[in-house]
Image (cartoon, grey):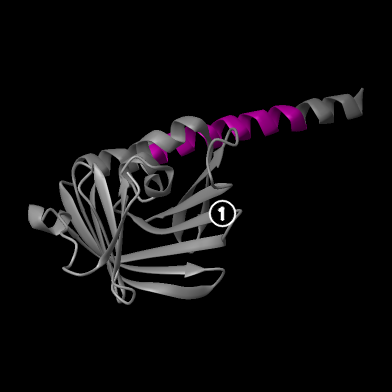
Amino acid sequence: MKYRKIFIGITTAFFLTNSFAQENAQEVLKNIQNKFNTINDLSADLIQSVNGNVNLKGKVYFKKENQLRFEFKNIIIVSDGETSWNYNKKDDKVIITDYESEGNKILSIRQIIFDYPQDCDLSTFESESKTVLELIPKDDAFSFNSIKLFIDDDNLITKALIDDPASGEIQVDLSNYQLNKNLPESYFQFSSPEGSQVIDLR
């Protein structure tokens, strides 16, 4: 009887803790979403690493709804929310795709914090003095195993860790945020340079 009571106590504690963790995760998510809703546009410095090796450094620009611009040394990625252009300066080649293609969805801030959580199990923990929100897909509909979002005191994402079965661990660090600076629409438009190779996959 004594062991049974201990087991029941441990089991109860587990479910209460799990329930609290889920509620806390929902609260953290809600705070991120509320912060996002106050942002009309933003820019930030960005560093991307794959399996610990830095492969991209540059800037990211965002403007509602789903307008994006990434500027790296040899690559520019631009999306107006309907079409995406990926320009490789070194190869002088432009690849054009629909914004809604699976490869572009992972770039969408809105989808990561509004759409993905609906189909993921959520949990939180503390790491590097930050609150971390982890998203684990409930099925194999996504191309990633998990996403961990590191959140600062202003409810901004400072780091994302993506467990990608194809590439490994992708880390994206964001810093030096500039919010609501009225970025011009021209940032999110792209014209293929004259003479460049254009591959249209729409």
Classify residue 90 by image quadrant: bottom left
Front residue of this view, candidates 12 and 134: 134
- Name the residue rendered at 53%, 45% in the picture: 143
Q: Give left or right: position of 87 versus 170.
A: left
- Across and down, in percent, residue 124 comes to 51, 45
- Across and down, in percent, residue 70 comes to 27, 62
Quick check: can you spot residue 178?
A: yes
The magenta stretch is 10-29
- Name the residue rendered at 39%, 72% in the picture: 56
Quick check: can you spot residue 182?
A: no
- Across and down, in percent, residue 38 comes to 18, 43
- Dot 1, crowdedness within 10 Å: few (<14), some or many (≥20)? some
Q: Amino acid at mark 1?
A: Asp
- Across and down, in percent, residue 88 comes to 32, 69
Considering the numbered disc 1 on the image, is that residue within a helix, a strand or a loop?
Answer: strand
Does residue 31 sit above or below 60 in this rendering? above
Q: Give left or right: position of 122 versus 47.
A: right
